Amino acid sequence: MEDKKVIAVMGATGAQGGGLCRAILKDVGGGYRVRALTRNAGSGKAKALKKLGAEVVEVDIDDVESVKKAYRGAHGAFCVTFFWEHFSPEKELAEAKNMADAAKQEGVRHVIWSTLEDTREWVPLDDRRMPTLMEKYKVPHFDAKGEANRLFSERGLPTTFLLTSFYWENLIHFGMGPKRGEDGNLYITLPMGDKMLPGIASEDIGKCAYAIFRRGGEFIGKTVGIAGDHLTGRQMAAALTKALGVEILYNAVSPEAYRGFGFPGADDLGNMFQFKRDFESVFCGARNLGFSRALNPAMQTFEAWLAENGGQIPIEIASRQASGE
Ligand SMILES: NC(=O)c1ccc[n+]([C@@H]2O[C@H](COP(=O)([O-])OP(=O)(O)OC[C@H]3O[C@@H](n4cnc5c(N)ncnc54)[C@H](OP(=O)(O)O)[C@@H]3O)[C@@H](O)[C@H]2O)c1
């Protein structure tokens, strides 16, 4: 046990970090142990990780000293930031900086930074295809993560840059599930036209991250993109129809319409989907399915994920979103 390499996992009670903790804990003879980082060691989720064998350590990502302490003696650090807690790209950059500073100070041997594209490399701020948001971003929750890549590389940290994909759990928890339109039909609404959206079961992100740690030097200094499926809205609707036993149609709205839905972050997500639509080959190309499955042979397809989780998708009775426009 003492010889095992410690992986310090930010967001351990969340989707990405939780999957990584469970992947490490399941691999009893694998040579790694988990340091689960949380703000509250007394929460139900933290206690559940402890029961499974994790070392649970309290941390506040906004307090660099607490992050340094949390990384002390760790071989690896899984770094993820929490945009949807505060909707601030500047705060997200500060979170990433704290983890990079702490990893440098503590001599962490392998960092996995859960990142996304800085879309401004493809859509500069003066590109009028989509509005500029918060004065200097196109897709704030993507751009800040991409911008933060340099915080890890400039410090010379041995980093793997992990490009994640749209969680299918968004259909359960993020209000993106099927909604009934005024015509009585059920729709999933995405501004993706006929383009493919790379998606993933969030639990698989952690499994991929564990595989990256296990393969050590192979992925240090590299960017690794992962997805379980690349599907059009029509294909997602067909899979939902099959899994839920009720007809679900695809409502392909424009990005402008999506940005106007009015929920918090709708403009950010409208731009995000537009980026994925307009740069389909770049975005899907960065998330190769064969590679992802080689990394994590248990990688779920959308169909497999639906078979396990479809029952949790709420089906709303009425919605402003699914008006068929
Ligand atoms: N939804 C998607 O489709 C998608 C796709 C790709 C990437 N992402 C990105 O994923 C990131 C979030 O990761 P996730 O989905 O794994 O998170 P999550 O499930 O929302 O969990 C976040 C965890 O972070 C911890 N946390 C929050 N604030 C903290 C703080 N100040 N200090 C320390 N820990 C804190 C919380 O744990 P405690 O309460 O235990 O402290 C919580 O369990 C976002 O930046 C998002 O942009 C999302």
Image (cartoon, helix red, strand yellow):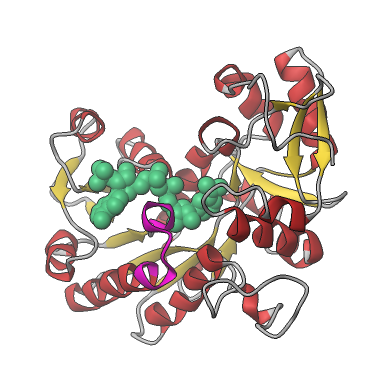
Give x and y (percent) for residue 240. Answer: 74, 25
Q: Which residues are magenta?
A: 82-92
Q: Nearer the viewer, residue 10 or 52?
A: 10
Q: In the image, what residue occupies the spot 13% across and 34% down?
A: 42
> Residue lying farthest right?
194
Give x and y (percent) for residue 214. Answer: 41, 54
**Is most of the magenta stretch helix, strand or loop?**
helix
Q: In the image, what residue occupies the spot 38% across and 75% down?
A: 158
Q: In the image, what residue occupies the spot 78% across and 66% down?
A: 279
Give residue 306's quadrant in the image.
top right
Give x and y (percent) for residue 4. Answer: 21, 50
Give residue 302's quadrant in the image.
top right
Give x and y (percent) for residue 294. Answer: 62, 48
Q: Is residue 194 magenta?
A: no
Q: In this rendering, is residue 93 above or below 10?
A: below
If the image is split into quadrants, where does the C terminus sit?
Answer: top right
Q: Nearer the viewer, residue 154 or 41?
A: 41
